[in-house]
Image: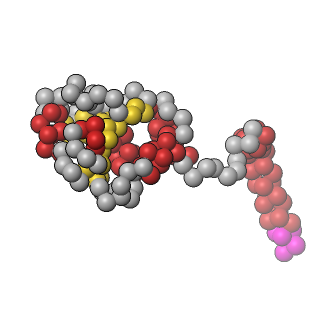
Amino acid sequence: MRIRFYLHVGLWCALFAIFLARSIPIVGPAVLENKIGPIDPNHSTDSYLSGLTHVRNGSELFSNLIDTLPREKSLVIFVDAESSQSQFLGMLVAYLTWPHDVRIVKVRETTLESELAAAKSSSVAGMFFCSVKPPAMLSGGTHFGSAITFMPGMGLGFNP
């Protein structure tokens, strides 16, 4: 009976030693590089924005922009109907613009101007163009990298 106990303890000690031997080369460098620890609250969205638009601290930039807009007005996000990257970027923008009411409009290059005319309203605070080039009649706006352009309501011919 005692020999079974010693074999049991020896087996678990051996398994623990194997676990340590396999994990120390992976965990050790991560600890030394300080990759383990608290992560800022916008880490995921900043990573996505950095990868898609090459903008650093994009979540904070969006937050600063959205804080200047009236909460009772909505936002319109135009995305390319044929580009999944554009649609993902549009959903990410919609997530970052919370608590505003948001409408995502999938457009093709040929239907953009008609969709833009339909979206103009006094209840719209502004429009985002995600991987969609804004029409030539619109100028200025705020650019977030090369993929996102924000046009405030006043720039669209109506009051925000």
- Closest to the observer, 69 or 39: 69
* Residues rendered magenta in the picture: 1-5
The quadrant the N terminus occupies is bottom right
Q: How is the image coloured?
A: secondary structure
Q: Residue at x 31, y 60 (%)?
A: 72
| Residue 83 spot, x, y in % from top left | 27, 33
The reply to whether the magenta stretch includes residue 2 is yes
Q: Residue at x 11, y 36 (%)?
A: 114
The reply to whether the magenta stretch includes residue 133 is no
When the figure is inspected, residue 143 is found, relative to residue 127, above or below; the finding is above
| Residue 135 spot, x, y in % from top left | 22, 28
When the figure is inspected, residue 147 is found, relative to residue 74, above or below; the finding is above
Image check: 2 left or right of 38? Answer: right
From the image, give the main secondary structure of the stretch colored magenta. helix
Asked whether the viewer can see residue 145, the reply is yes
- Closest to the observer, 98 or 15: 98
| Residue 154 spot, x, y in % from top left | 28, 41
Q: Quadrant of residue 13?
A: bottom right
Asked whether the viewer can see residue 85, the reply is no
- Closest to the observer, 79 or 63: 63
| Residue 120 spot, x, y in % from top left | 18, 44
- Closest to the observer, 37 or 24: 37
Q: Count the marks: how many?
A: 0
Q: Residue at x 22, y 24 (%)?
A: 136
Image check: 86 left or right of 158? Answer: right
Name the outermost residue toward the bottom. 1
Q: Residue at x 52, y 45 (%)?
A: 60
Name the outermost residue toward the top. 136
Image check: 70 left or right of 118? Answer: right
